[in-house]
Amino acid sequence: MPDNHDQTDESSDASRRDFLKVTGAATAAGALGSLAGCTGGGGGDGGDGGGGQATDTSAEEKKQEGASSFFGGTETETGDGGGGQATEESDGGGGGETVNISYLSAEAVENSKTKPHFQNSISRFEEQMGDVQVQLQTASYGDLKSKLASSVEGGNPPTLAEGGSTGLRFYFSGKVPSHTDFIEGSEHFPGKWSAANRSMADFRGDWWCGGSMRHSVSNLGIRPKLFSQAGVDSPDQFETWSGFYDACQALADENSDVFPYEETGVWNDLESYWGYSHTAYTGGKDPWIRGDPVDPTVIINNDDHDDRPRTDGIIQSAVKMANEFSSPESASRGDEEIPSLMLTDKVASFNYATQNYARWYTVKEDAQIGWHDGDGDFMLLPHPKLDADFGEKIGVSDLEGLEGQHGGHVWALEQAQFLFSGFSDKQTERAWDLNVFFHRDEEHVMKEYGEFYQAIPGDSDMMQLLLQEYPNTPQNFTKVLENLGNYPKQYVTTGAPWDVGGTDQIRWTDINETISQSIAGQRSAEDTPGVVAERVNKTLAEQNKENMREA
């Protein structure tokens, strides 16, 4: 991907016009005319008879392979040994009887366009398969866990669900089966999954789910107009945490009506921190938990570990940056509020910027995305990397003299799809076919992520196809891809590589909620790592066991 800062400037008007068509500012008709007759990969998922990479590669090798490249490649694909296991086995009776399955999705109700699109796609899937009817069930991401819990407890789970990391708990209890047979019999997976998907779907050497259909990625977002007015003459100043800190300080001195940096973290929703925590490291090292998942090493507040200062230092700096530059509402501020705050000159930057450009055009139809000679409305950049001077600037001695690299969080675990146990073979097969369809059907993927809900497809070749179909994407989308390509080991899925019980509790509560409480003033920055570590270790002691799956 090109790396010039004004990459979209020369074609900005054309780019904006193209994408206003597909973001609601103008009609979406014709945006994908070239795909009108494209049905993509269909529903079946042929296999190689059960051989392939998943059986020959250790869990640790798969983790390392997944970290080496975001887009990955085809080197891990299984062969083309023929028949489609998921579509050719007989259910032992009934012949041509219709198979009824249900699918629970949150993405389908993410906005007003996604549900009808999912419904249309499901209709095409039913027509292609010829022997299946799909009941679409929906819930918001906020309600998804409770809806899944109640349906499972009531003995009426969906056949397939987009349930995220909630599925891990069901996997431990046997309510979600191993997906290894399907993955090993697939001509697509894991080879065409992104590295984030491969890392997420593998739990201690077993494929526990069917991957995530799409990803979002956390980055730094700035309002160039405000920073250039404060004397910042290039986005290069945001390369390091010291440069970012100096830019925020200059803006604070220049304009007291603007909050230079807004931390977004609704009590336990501090996902922005997941991303910039990696910038104290290089090579994709995990800032929190490493080693044997049965008896893992916790880096946080661990004086016996050489990397403790990097992890603890960024935790402290997160609290200090928010206290110095963010609004009093930051500890209860959701990232959804930021576009309107930034485009009305109330906030100048945040660390939860993603590839979704529609949210900016929704607030301002003619928003200029990119630097634009310092006159841009919004620009996406990688999280600043740790430099040797930042610790002294921010007042965190742990970080003094240390350096790191750009990095961020890739959402994959949060959108994991998985099958439920207790259904007939034919129902399970058709549910798997539906999962493959959502990953591989070109019409569904292109329209969904290029038109209705801007995101990165979970399959690497679908991402390349999306770029071909949408060549004039705004700067924030293309910059995300550039960051992923430039620093593949540094952009990872938080929590999945730990392979521990209690992943959600550790991510959302022990880490995020604790840091958010500190930002809200409940404890000092210096005391925060100790509290985080205490809670993480307690969760591991209570929930992480050698054999978490019941027989």
Image (cartoon, rainbow, N blue to C red):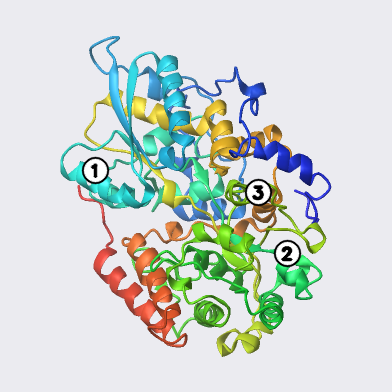
One can see residue 74 in this view: no
Q: Measure the C-alpha gap from mark 3 to mark 2.
A: 17 Å
Left or right of 117 on screen, residue 392: right
Disc assigned to residue 477: 3
Check whether the beta carbons of the residues at disc 2 and disc 1 lie within 8 A of each other. no
Judging by the rendered image, the residue that carries numbered circle 1 is 175
Residue type at tag 2? Pro
> Which residue occupies 42% across, 73% down?
516
> Which residue occupies 55% across, 61% down?
338
Dot 1 crowding, Cα within 10 Å, few <14, some 14–19, many 20+: some
Rendered view: 30 above or below 526: above
> Which residue occupies 68% across, 78% down?
255
Q: Which corner quadrant of the image does residue 392 belong to?
A: bottom right
One can see residue 222 in this view: yes
> Which residue occupies 38% across, 64% down?
508
Rendered view: 138 above or below 343: above
- Quick one: label 3 or label 2, which is nearer the N terminus? 2
Judging by the rendered image, the residue that carries numbered circle 2 is 224
Mark 3 lies on a secondary structure that is helix
